[in-house]
Image (cartoon, rainbow, N blue to C red):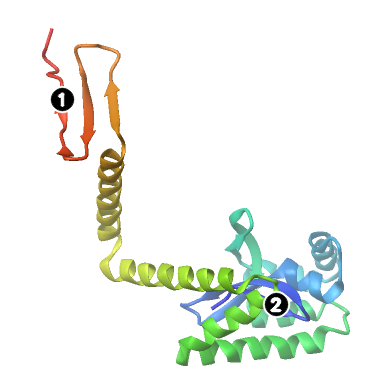
Amino acid sequence: MSNIKLFESKQIRSVWNDEEKKWYFVVEDVVAVLTDSKDPKQYVKRMKLRDKELAKGWVQIVPTLLIDTSGGKQKMSCANTEGLFRIIQSIPSPKAEPFKRWLAKVGYERLEEIENPELASKRAREIYKAKGYSDDWIEKRIRSIAIRDELTDEWEKRGVRQQIEYAISFLFKSIRFLAFSSAKVTMRSADPGKGFSYPSKTSGYRRSFANPHCP
């Protein structure tokens, strides 16, 4: 399932609310698509000044959600289909009606993907292909998403405590791997009488600590 939707070849970022079973779309992206505005933030501000009723109910229909961006996850103003229908009423655009039909289609496709998860993977491939990514990149991306989803599901089943235990276990395994791989890793404190070293040999692994009570 891709969080990037395409309307007339233009990207609209979205996030799926599993609890509500609804898509939420980034309002700025929708405004940019419908108005071709170079500054959708300013357009939204002016729109709220024009439509006082919309401004009053803005907080209720436009929550702030975490969205994946090129700079990492960021909080952005989003709205579900019902909220967007209300916002569209304040946007004089010939694209309004086609966009409403597009929203209905996106919602229907998500229901299809819930029943048949393979459709989500197929549609994600089509979107990445349309964005110009290579087949090799697309396959790696789809595979990484699948692995991430499986890991997330497993963590949810086991609970947060086991997630932490798993992370700690993984950290220690990584440290041991680095110790084995290095020719020699030596660490000492400022006091020459105290310290520890991790000599590493191909035949085995030895760990030694200096006696902290040595003079």
Q: Is residue 169 left or right of residue 125?
A: left
Residue extending farthest to the front is 203
Q: Is residue 33 left or right of residue 135?
A: right
Q: Nearer the viewer, residue 26 or 191?
A: 191
Q: Earlier in the sequence, mark 1 or mark 2?
A: 2
Residue 214 vertical placement versus 199 (above, below): above
Q: Say what amino acid the circle numbered 2 marks.
A: Ala
Residue 60 vertical placement versus 111 (above, below): above
Q: Residue at x 80, y 65 (%)?
A: 44
Residue highlighted by disc 2: 130
Find residue 66 and report its image quarter.
Answer: bottom right
Separation of marks 1 and 2 at Cα, in angstroms: 58 Å
Residue extending farthest to the top is 215
Percent coordinates x, y for residue 141 in the rendering: 53, 69
Q: Residue at x 63, y 81 (%)?
A: 126
Q: How many marks?
A: 2
Q: Which mark is residue 209?
A: 1
Q: Nearer the viewer, residue 18 or 60?
A: 18
Percent coordinates x, y for residue 180 in the rendering: 25, 41
SS at mark 2 in the image: helix
Percent coordinates x, y for residue 211 in the rendering: 12, 19
Q: Which mark is residue 98?
A: none
Q: Say what amino acid the circle numbered 1 marks.
A: Phe
If the image is split into quadrants, where does the C terminus sit?
top left
Percent coordinates x, y for residue 104 in the rendering: 66, 90
Q: Nearer the viewer, residue 34 or 112?
A: 112
Q: Residues within 10 Å of mark 1 (few under 14, many from 20)?
A: few
Q: Residues within 10 Å of mark 2 (few under 14, many from 20)?
A: few
Find residue 57 and report its image quarter.
Answer: bottom right
Residue 171 vertical placement versus 201 (above, below): below
SS at mark 1 in the image: strand
Q: Residue at x 15, y 34 (%)?
A: 206
